[in-house]
Image (cartoon, rainbow, N blue to C red):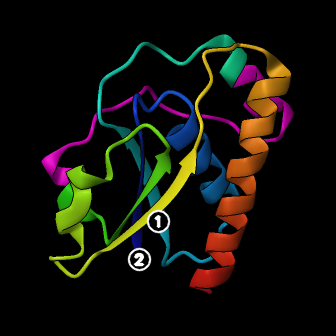
């Protein structure tokens, strides 16, 4: 199964979800990538530091969603609470899953706030991995 994790800019929530998934997942038949619906600024050093302190390394630059990624995926997980689900309503039409987590974003570069959101995503990813076993 190929999972596409999506948030608004691919500079925090979907990136950290991809990092957590790829670190914790031991099943080589499960793959994860991430993208944003809008190309955003580079990932902030505060986000990189907060994720690293939790043991997760964010790799790569933010990327926008593409036709190639939409064809590649078997399931889309909208990680964010600020991405319109209507953008991906046809995913089910093509026999693919659509999962919605609604994780809030933060404009804050406060490490405690960032780590709180990382923890929420970590729980969702751990539950997803359990479900997919």
Does residue 72 appear left or right of residue 40 in this picture? left
Boundaries of the magenta span: 48-68
Position in image of residue 132 (x %, y %): 57, 82
Q: Is residue 50 magenta?
A: yes
Verify whether residue 14 appears in magenta: no
Question: Can the viewer see residue 69 in this picture?
Answer: no
Pinpoint residue 77: horizontal percent, then vertical percent: 44, 59
Query: Does residue 86 appear in the picture of this structure?
Result: yes
Precedes in sequence: disc 1 or disc 2: 2
Which residue is pictured at 64% across the width and 73% down the height? 129
Q: Are marks 1 and 2 in contact (CB under 8 Å)?
A: yes
Dividing the picture into quadrants, the one containing residue 23 is bottom right
Compared across the picture, whether 32 is left or right of 51 comes to: left
Q: Quadrant of residue 71?
A: bottom left
Q: Is residue 4 above or below residue 129?
A: above
Residue 89 in the figure: left or right of residue 42: left
Judging depth in this view, the residue of 124 and 41 nearest the camera is 124
**Mark 1 — residue?**
31
- Residue 48 in picture, x, y percent from top left: 68, 23
Q: Is residue 52 above or below residue 88?
A: above
Q: Which residue is mark 2?
A: 1
Q: Residue at the far bottom: name it.
A: 133
């Amino acid at each position: 199964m190929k999972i596409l994790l999506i948030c608004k800019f691919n500079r925090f929530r979907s990136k950290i979800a991809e990092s957590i998934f790829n670190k914790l997942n031991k099943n080589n038949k499960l793959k994860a990538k991430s993208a944003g619906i809008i190309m955003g600024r580079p990932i902030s050093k505060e986000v990189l530091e907060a994720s690293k302190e939790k043991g997760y390394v964010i790799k790569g630059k933010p990327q926008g969603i593409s036709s190639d990624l939409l064809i590649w995926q078997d399931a889309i997980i909208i990680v964010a609470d600020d991405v319109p689900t209507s953008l991906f309503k046809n995913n089910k039409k093509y026999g693919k899953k659509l999962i919605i987590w609604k994780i809030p974003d933060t404009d804050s570069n406060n490490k405690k706030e960032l780590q709180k959101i990382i923890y929420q995503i970590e729980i969702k990813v751990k539950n997803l991995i359990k479900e997919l076993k």
